[in-house]
Amino acid sequence: MSTQEHQAAHVHRDDEGSRLGMWLFLFTELILFGGLFIAYSVYRYMHQAEFHLAARELNTLIGTFNTFILLTSSLTMALSIAAIQMQKRVLSIFFQLITLLFGLGFLVNKFFEWSAKFHHGIVCILLSAWH
Protein backbone atom coordinates (compact mmCIF):
# COMPACT_ATOMS: atom_id res chain seq x y z
CA MET A 1 0.00 0.00 0.00
CA SER A 2 1.46 3.36 -1.03
CA THR A 3 1.54 6.41 1.25
CA GLN A 4 -1.18 8.10 -0.80
CA GLU A 5 -3.47 5.07 -0.56
CA HIS A 6 -2.74 4.81 3.17
CA GLN A 7 -3.74 8.49 3.69
CA ALA A 8 -6.89 8.07 1.58
CA ALA A 9 -7.90 5.03 3.67
CA HIS A 10 -7.87 7.15 6.86
CA VAL A 11 -9.96 10.06 5.63
CA HIS A 12 -12.92 10.45 7.96
CA ARG A 13 -16.17 11.86 6.66
CA ASP A 14 -19.28 12.14 8.72
CA ASP A 15 -21.91 13.13 6.18
CA GLU A 16 -24.77 12.05 8.45
CA GLY A 17 -23.40 14.10 11.35
CA SER A 18 -22.91 17.09 9.07
CA ARG A 19 -26.49 16.86 7.85
CA LEU A 20 -27.81 16.55 11.40
CA GLY A 21 -25.74 19.54 12.48
CA MET A 22 -27.10 21.66 9.63
CA TRP A 23 -30.69 20.70 10.46
CA LEU A 24 -30.12 21.53 14.13
CA PHE A 25 -28.68 24.91 13.16
CA LEU A 26 -31.66 25.65 10.90
CA PHE A 27 -34.06 24.58 13.66
CA THR A 28 -32.45 26.94 16.20
CA GLU A 29 -32.61 29.77 13.65
CA LEU A 30 -36.30 29.03 13.13
CA ILE A 31 -36.92 29.18 16.88
CA LEU A 32 -34.95 32.41 17.30
CA PHE A 33 -36.42 34.33 14.38
CA GLY A 34 -39.88 32.83 14.86
CA GLY A 35 -39.86 34.14 18.42
CA LEU A 36 -38.69 37.55 17.29
CA PHE A 37 -41.42 37.77 14.63
CA ILE A 38 -44.06 36.74 17.17
CA ALA A 39 -42.83 39.37 19.65
CA TYR A 40 -42.81 41.98 16.88
CA SER A 41 -46.37 41.06 15.87
CA VAL A 42 -47.64 41.25 19.45
CA TYR A 43 -46.03 44.65 20.05
CA ARG A 44 -47.25 45.95 16.70
CA TYR A 45 -50.80 44.87 17.56
CA MET A 46 -50.61 46.40 21.05
CA HIS A 47 -49.07 49.72 19.92
CA GLN A 48 -50.53 50.37 16.47
CA ALA A 49 -50.39 54.17 16.60
CA GLU A 50 -46.73 54.20 17.65
CA PHE A 51 -45.78 51.76 14.90
CA HIS A 52 -47.61 53.86 12.31
CA LEU A 53 -45.80 56.99 13.49
CA ALA A 54 -42.42 55.23 13.47
CA ALA A 55 -43.02 53.84 9.96
CA ARG A 56 -43.33 57.39 8.65
CA GLU A 57 -39.74 58.01 9.80
CA LEU A 58 -38.32 55.07 7.83
CA ASN A 59 -36.49 55.59 4.56
CA THR A 60 -37.67 52.78 2.29
CA LEU A 61 -34.93 53.48 -0.28
CA ILE A 62 -32.18 52.85 2.29
CA GLY A 63 -34.03 49.76 3.58
CA THR A 64 -34.41 48.39 0.07
CA PHE A 65 -30.73 49.01 -0.66
CA ASN A 66 -29.73 47.27 2.61
CA THR A 67 -31.84 44.25 1.69
CA PHE A 68 -30.32 44.11 -1.79
CA ILE A 69 -26.81 44.30 -0.34
CA LEU A 70 -27.45 41.54 2.20
CA LEU A 71 -29.06 39.15 -0.28
CA THR A 72 -26.49 39.76 -3.00
CA SER A 73 -23.53 39.41 -0.63
CA SER A 74 -24.93 36.06 0.53
CA LEU A 75 -25.12 35.01 -3.12
CA THR A 76 -21.54 36.06 -3.87
CA MET A 77 -20.26 34.18 -0.81
CA ALA A 78 -22.17 31.04 -1.86
CA LEU A 79 -20.68 31.41 -5.36
CA SER A 80 -17.24 31.70 -3.80
CA ILE A 81 -17.73 28.43 -1.92
CA ALA A 82 -18.98 26.75 -5.10
CA ALA A 83 -15.87 28.00 -6.93
CA ILE A 84 -13.64 26.51 -4.21
CA GLN A 85 -15.40 23.19 -4.58
CA MET A 86 -14.74 23.31 -8.34
CA GLN A 87 -11.03 24.06 -7.61
CA LYS A 88 -11.31 27.56 -9.14
CA ARG A 89 -9.26 29.52 -6.64
CA VAL A 90 -9.08 32.81 -8.59
CA LEU A 91 -12.84 32.87 -9.15
CA SER A 92 -13.41 32.18 -5.45
CA ILE A 93 -11.15 35.09 -4.46
CA PHE A 94 -13.00 37.33 -6.94
CA PHE A 95 -16.36 36.50 -5.34
CA GLN A 96 -14.90 37.04 -1.87
CA LEU A 97 -13.66 40.49 -2.90
CA ILE A 98 -17.11 41.32 -4.27
CA THR A 99 -18.57 40.17 -0.95
CA LEU A 100 -16.18 42.48 0.90
CA LEU A 101 -17.26 45.38 -1.31
CA PHE A 102 -20.89 44.64 -0.49
CA GLY A 103 -19.93 44.60 3.21
CA LEU A 104 -18.32 48.02 2.88
CA GLY A 105 -21.39 49.26 1.01
CA PHE A 106 -23.57 47.98 3.86
CA LEU A 107 -21.47 49.90 6.41
CA VAL A 108 -21.63 53.11 4.35
CA ASN A 109 -25.39 52.68 3.98
CA LYS A 110 -25.75 52.16 7.75
CA PHE A 111 -23.66 55.29 8.36
CA PHE A 112 -26.11 57.39 6.35
CA GLU A 113 -29.12 55.68 7.90
CA TRP A 114 -27.97 56.20 11.47
CA SER A 115 -26.68 59.73 10.76
CA ALA A 116 -30.19 60.71 9.65
CA LYS A 117 -31.66 59.19 12.81
CA PHE A 118 -29.19 61.07 15.04
CA HIS A 119 -29.91 64.27 13.11
CA HIS A 120 -33.65 63.89 13.74
CA GLY A 121 -33.09 63.03 17.42
CA ILE A 122 -34.72 59.62 17.07
CA VAL A 123 -31.88 57.73 18.73
CA CYS A 124 -31.84 60.09 21.70
CA ILE A 125 -35.55 59.45 22.22
CA LEU A 126 -34.99 55.68 22.04
CA LEU A 127 -32.09 55.80 24.47
CA SER A 128 -33.99 57.93 27.00
CA ALA A 129 -37.00 55.58 26.79
CA TRP A 130 -34.72 52.59 27.40
CA HIS A 131 -33.45 53.88 30.78
Image (spheres, rainbow, N blue to C red):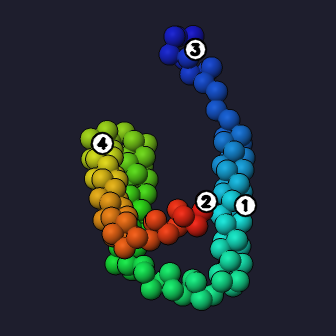
Residue 93 circle label:
4
Disc 4 to disc 1, C-alpha distance: 34 Å
Drawn side of residue 18 relative to residue 86, left or right: right
Contact? badges 2 and 4 (CB < 8 Å): no
Q: Which residue is mark 1?
A: 31
**Mark 4: few, some, or many residues within 10 Å (few <14, many ≥20)?**
some
Disc 1 to disc 3, C-alpha distance: 44 Å
Q: Nearer the viewer, mark 1 or mark 3?
A: 1
Q: Which residue is mark 3?
A: 6
Residue at image location 51% in from the left, 86% down from the top:
53
**Quadrant housing residue 120:** bottom left
Q: Which residue is mark 2?
A: 131
Q: Between disc 4 and disc 1, whose residue precedes? A: 1
Q: Between disc 1 and disc 2, whose residue precedes? A: 1
Q: Secondary structure at mark 1?
A: helix
Q: Between disc 1 and disc 3, whose residue precedes? A: 3
Q: Position of residue 93 (x, y in %)?
A: 30, 42
